[in-house]
Amino acid sequence: MPGLSFSSKKKGRRQAVTEKPKPVAAQAVKDPLESFARSDFLESAGYYGTQATMLRSTTAQTGGLHLAIAEAPTSARGIFCGQDATTGWPVFHDEVTGYRIKTISSPNVVIIGDLGVGKSHFMKTWGVMRHLALGRRVVVIDKKMQATDQEDRDHEGEYAKLARTLGIEPIRFTGQVGGLKVNPLDPSITSSGTLAAGQTELLKAILAEIIQRPLNARESKALRVAHAAALERSEREQREPVINDVVHFLLSPDPKVVAQQRGSFTTSDYLEWGTDIGFALEECIDGDLKGLIDGPTSSEIRLNSGLTVFDISALPDNGPAVPVVMAIINTWVRNVIVQQKKIVPTLFCVEEGWHLVTGNFAKISQQNTKKSRGLAFGTATAYQHISDVPSDSPAIATIKEAGTVLLFKQARRDDAEQCQRLFGLHPALVETIMKLPQGCALLLIGSRPPIVLKAIGSELELELANTDSALHSRAQTGLDGQVLGAVEKEGAIA
Ligand SMILES: Nc1ncnc2c1ncn2[C@@H]1O[C@H](COP(=O)(O)OP(=O)(O)OP(=O)(O)O)[C@@H](O)[C@H]1O
Ligand SMILES: [Mg+2]
């Protein structure tokens, strides 16, 4: 009935409503107490509200007045990612569930964005903590050093606080004598390499990284023969083979193993082919890679817990240490998983991932990535810009094939355009990518339409994912170099 918003059996009340065209508020201004005492119940039911005049129309006409109701951008299956910034719908997705429900065909994730836009924050919350809550295994290579507010600790990787809060001690590589080692000849990296890159390929990539060029055919052959001799000797001596065995047999080829090879080449031929790489490897083991790969894998390095953090933030940025250790860990983790009886979905998270996908290790990691589906093994890599990866690198294909892509802000137009082209996005999205605020990203799930995602975390997640503590430091230095004050508790803004 026009003009009646609330039906009441009491006659007087009904009249009061229909006979009151003027807004109740206007009367209330006159004398609120004089008219009648308001009931809380009727107030909450809208009884006293002003009433719009009814408009007669047809359903065909009013159909045009309905606001569009947006469809949910994802199903409700998967890990909570945040909110669709356009429609407000919650967004759910993760690389394991997405693969199971066939929204993606690759479990690999790529995260791209400028400095400080929220890549690590997203990796730590969505990529690490929420997977752990579902009983999945997460392995992190932590490359970025983070200031600590604890005076008794050295600066360490940015995942240290998160790991310790969950009761896990990060595995820290320092590259110093007595520090942790990871052995490229570890027996758990099978030489047959059926499901992951094998030892010989790993050795070749390490050497190519050291000499900064690919091995030629003769060097490659000398290395294979030295590797075979090293495995044979360690088996005879019932111990784990180590890299020094390879150096030894490059510089003194084993006549027995040489005799088993095709062709009529002598140990002198093998010595000639292997001398340069033998010396280079020896020098690097005593220099840039000192204490890192020259012995059996340290017993602390295990994949027993749900979360394993390899902290390599203390390794020098330049030189072969970071890419060599990253590649060995990547291959070792995959092989350990292959040998497990019950496969637990495992996520391998790497920040500053170009070390893995460029240069001499690109082939190794591409090979590992291709075999990842069968192992329920997903790799999440974060980069700042696509331009960090050379256009002719196999990494470009690896990035393109990722099932899940998060494009955070790329302020420079050419960076944004490169992403738009690489992922085949509509050109209008270049502007969107350039203007994304901190914590927002364009989420690409398989071939589905892009979602502008606002990443949301709980209070605990925000605290554990915070990387701003150093910039919140109130410590000051005097002209005499004396430092006053300390790093403020995180969240404190000057
Ligand atoms: N979704 C978010 N919600 C709230 N705060 C956020 C969010 N994303 C990022 N931040 C804030 O931004 C800071 C920087 O984010 P983060 O460390 O993730 O940047 P980044 O992209 O990894 O930068 P870099 O390239 O330097 O590693 C975080 O410490 C956090 O305070
Ligand atoms: Mg980061």
Image (cartoon, helix red, strand yellow):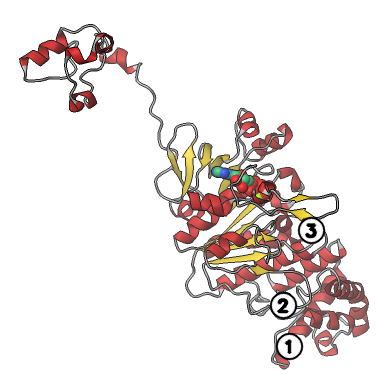
Q: Nearer the viewer, residue 209 or 1?
A: 1
Instruction: Tell which circle, 1 or 3, labels the residue nearer the N-terminal end.
Output: 1
Instruction: Tell which circle, 2 or 3, labels the residue nearer the N-terminal end.
Output: 2
Tell me the quarter of the picture where residue 296 sits.
bottom right
- Gap between marks 1 and 3 measured at Cα: 33 Å
Q: Which three-letter amino acid code belongs to the residue tagged 2?
A: Leu
Residue at the image point whose x is 78% and y is 60% from the top: 360
* Residue 104, image x, y percentages: 51, 49
Q: Nearer the viewer, residue 249 or 112?
A: 112
* Residue 415, image x, y percentages: 71, 37
Residue at which label 1 appears: 234
Residue at the image point whose x is 61% and y is 69% from the top: 333
Q: Is residue 289 left or right of residue 139?
A: right
Mark 2 neighbour density, 10 Å: few (under 14) some (14–19) many (20 or more): many
Residue at which label 3 appears: 317
Tell me the quarter of the picture where residue 141 sits.
bottom right
Residue at which label 2 appears: 185
